[in-house]
Amino acid sequence: MKPSTVQPDFVSSIRSQLDSRADVPTTHEIVTVARELAPHIADVDLVELVSLITNDQIGLGPLSDLSNIPNVTDIVVNGFSDIWIDRGYGLERIESSWKSESELREFAIRLAVSHSRRLDDLNPFVDFTLVSGIRCHILLPPLAVFGTQISLRIPKRQSLSLEELLHDQSPEVLMVLRRIITTRKSFMICGGTGTGKTTLLSAMLSQVAAHERILIIEDTSEIVVNHPHCTKLQSRNANVEGIGEVSMQTLVRQALRMRPDRIIVGEIRGAEVVDLFAALNTGHEGCAATIHANSGADVISRVQLLGLMNGLGNEAIQVQLPTAIDVVIELARIGSRRVVREIGELQLVDGQCHYQPVVTFSPKFLIHDRSSAKLLEHGAV
């Protein structure tokens, strides 16, 4: 990161003055205070000073430059001297500009407060989304043993096409994924963290026919879709006073009244699974969601756990899951590559939900059982 030419003590003095005036100072206020403390400050230093304080208050401060590096998806801070980024080649260590743990902690607290979150010894962790769509998680010591931890997830600024995304995989992958969209199969994309679930979902939704209305529900706006009729709903956390929360579950219910052709849930992780089942089992086809699960078979146990935690009985889960979701797409990360490893179907057999692999793409294209796979009917591949 580029070192500052403005002395840290001077910046701290201005911050202490501004803290008593407003949570988020204007450019005029910053310049006024700076000239009061240093009447002969150069214009070039004023520009840098405004940038430093504005970024710290409403942006990412020393992390702003890192977030603008092409293809960066993640930034992680493990204490004041240990910063890493991921731009598609795995985690890379980056030089830090923080000089002490106290300086990093002060930055983290200012960042949280500027987004109406409380962060202190009694509330040592926080999760929020910046205006830019960047998702931020902060955890303070002593829970974080090696110093203040900051984790940033950087959203894609544009959607890749399926062709661009799958350029290094076999052409059969593209053919099957296109068929899932055109035949209006409801699908779930699974995989671990960083396998590209949201990226693939965005690319697939861009293949939806232009006359269809896509309604996307997320807790953090990450899905970028190149489609003429796509609208988004985003959940909201409670404010500092603990009020004002709007959950994903509530938004799924609202979506049913908004005339969607396809309902998309950015990630299934809680009570919204109950209402999603209700929506998909009442005539909505071609819907989709992502879920954290290491394999297609693990999707069943993952959804089962979420359902049981939110009042849905095991028998209901076993019946509703395969009638709501037709196809599971499994992603994996192999080195720096993110690949579609397997596509399978969920089937109801004797009252139980079963996962049936249809095609596997690693190390080569393999059809498991064409005769039982609805996905491959009519010569899909």
Image: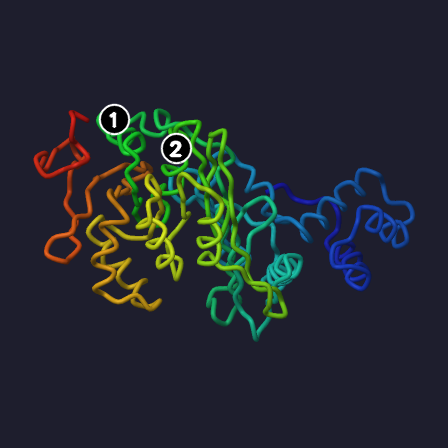
Work out which quarter of the rendered image holds the N terminus and state it: top right
Q: Amino acid at mark 1?
A: Met
* Disc 2 to disc 1: CB gap under 8 Å: no
Residue 368, image quadrant = top left
Q: Mark 1: which secondary structure?
A: helix
How far from the left and from the top, in percent, is residue 278? 34, 55
How far from the left and from the top, in percent, is residue 214? 44, 38
Distance CA(mark 2)–CA(mark 1): 14 Å
- Mark 1: few, some, or many residues within 10 Å (few <14, many ≥20)? few
> On the image, numbered disc 1 is attached to which residue?
175
How far from the left and from the top, in percent, is residue 92? 43, 44
> On the image, numbered disc 2 is attached to which residue?
203
Q: Reading the chain from its start, which is encountered first: label 2 or label 1?
A: 1
110 above or below 59?
Answer: below
Residue drawn at point x = 32 percent, y = 54 percent: 277
Say how many tags the image has.
Answer: 2
- Mark 2: few, some, or many residues within 10 Å (few <14, many ≥20)? many
Q: Mark 2: which secondary structure?
A: helix
Residue 187 numbered tag: none
Residue drawn at point x = 55 percent, y = 61 percent: 237
Q: Amino acid at mark 2?
A: Ala
**Between residues 133 and 79, which one lies in front from this camera angle?**
133
* Left or right of 166 on screen, residue 22: right
How far from the left and from the top, in percent, is residue 33? 86, 53
Work out which quarter of the rendered image holds the C terminus and state it: top left
Query: What's the image's color scheme?
Result: rainbow
289 above or below 367?
Answer: below
Residue drawn at point x = 65 percent, y = 44 percent: 3
Residue drawn at point x = 25 percent, y = 55 percent: 320
105 above or below 129?
Answer: below
